[in-house]
Image: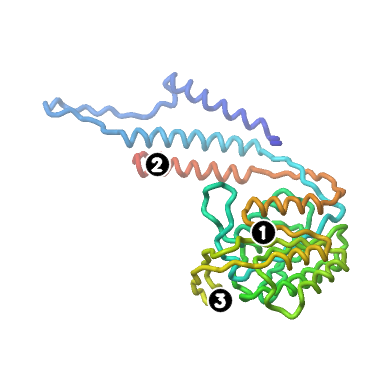
Amino acid sequence: MIVFENPTAFLFFLVIPAYYVLRKLNIFTRIAFPLTIADWKGRSFEWKGGFSKVSSVFSAFILFLAFVVFVFALASPVINHQEKIYTSKGTDVLFVLDSSPSMASRDIAPQNDGGASITRIEAAKQSIRMLLSGDRGTAFGLVLMSNQAVAAVPPTLDYDYFLKKLDQVQIGEIGDGTAIGIGLSSAVYHLSNSTAPKKCIVLITDGENNAGVIHPETAAMLANENNITLYTFGIGTRGTVPMEYIDPNTEKIHSGTYDSKFDSLPLEKLASIAQGRYFGIESLADLSEALSEISRKEGTVQSFYLRNVETHCYTKLLLLSGLLFSLAWIVRRIFLMEIL
């Protein structure tokens, strides 16, 4: 809702009709000097003013718009809105995202039919972004997994920070293996001391465990012992798929094909150990639907209160008005060569 702290400023709009009335009464008319030229029996003067005429009309419109914005700025508009302030914890969700080179495989169908396929890691990023856009009150975290694991973001309600770190994820930045056991163990470690009523891990990977010293089933049992639900996503299609990525460490471009043939049974077993569920993902729609289902299942009722937030627009409108006045001056002085 928009309110104006100084609504009497709108009386300045009366200046516009008053100006035109005074112009009709020959007050405030433009100064003009007649120039008499003798008949020299030559070709009459012509004003080829197509561009000049358009520029004149454009500058007049910009001046009018600048005046309108200036009056609104003087009226001091304030945008009022309410935001939720949660007084109890919600669910803690920690994503374990595979960032190995195979995640650069381009075989995930987009939302729109007929569009070009996208990479597996980009599909994961897009779906996580969509989940965050409509799920306030849940704390999200991110663990990157390859031949080692890195906790990029601990569970947080700062969604802007989370999305910033998510956007910075690069293929191959922490190696080229798939250490599922280490990735899950790192996630369990960051959730084990959480006081959230519900805690869950979402593992997004396209391969089997082939690195690390911790067996994935051991990590899944640790999650179960700490009342952490584990959901596993096997992303990608089987077969030969195109793959291309830039190694962030050497800046070398790797391009070719990838023979995708991972077995979903180990991921299904991991999910069952930690009271979760396995999802096979072959399209962006599958991934978004799976994340939405987890959000509904793991959601909790939180207490909150509404806080009124005021955004003052005076400074921004005043700056916009100044820019419009400057634009009108440039058009009239430089293009039309008028002296204002």
Q: Please state if 48 lies on the left or on the right of 180 as rendered.
A: left
Q: Amino acid at mark 3?
A: Asn
Label 2: how many Cα within 10 Å (few below 14, some 14–19, many 20+): some
Pointer 1 or 2: first along the chain: 1
- Residues at discs 3 and 1 in contact (Cβ within 8 Å): no
Residue 158: horizontal and vertical position, in percent? 73, 58
Q: Nearer the viewer, mark 1 or mark 2?
A: 1
Residue hosting label 1: 163
Pointer 3 or 2: first along the chain: 3
Pointer 3 or 1: first along the chain: 1
Of all residues shown, which one is farthest toward the top? 25
- Taking depth in this image into account, of 307 and 280 the one nearest to the observer is 280
> How far is mark 1 from mark 2, CA to CA?
42 Å
Q: Nearer the viewer, mark 3 or mark 2?
A: 3
Residue 201: horizontal and vertical position, in percent? 77, 63
Q: Secondary structure at mark 1?
A: helix
- Residues at discs 1 and 2 in contact (Cβ within 8 Å): no
Residue hosting label 2: 331
Residue 234: horizontal and vertical position, in percent? 68, 62
Tell me the quarter of the picture where residue 160 sits.
bottom right
Tell me the quarter of the picture where residue 164 sits.
bottom right
Asked if residue 9 can be seen in this view, the reply is yes
Q: Amino acid at mark 1?
A: Leu
Question: With respect to residue 278, does 40 lie above or below?
Answer: above
Q: Please state if 57 lies on the left or on the right of 278 as rendered.
A: left
Q: Amino acid at mark 2?
A: Val
**Residue at x 71%, y 79% (from the top left corner):** 212
- Can you tell which mark lies on residue 249? 3
Q: Nearer the viewer, mark 3 or mark 1?
A: 3
**Residue at x 56%, y 59% (from the top left corner):** 107
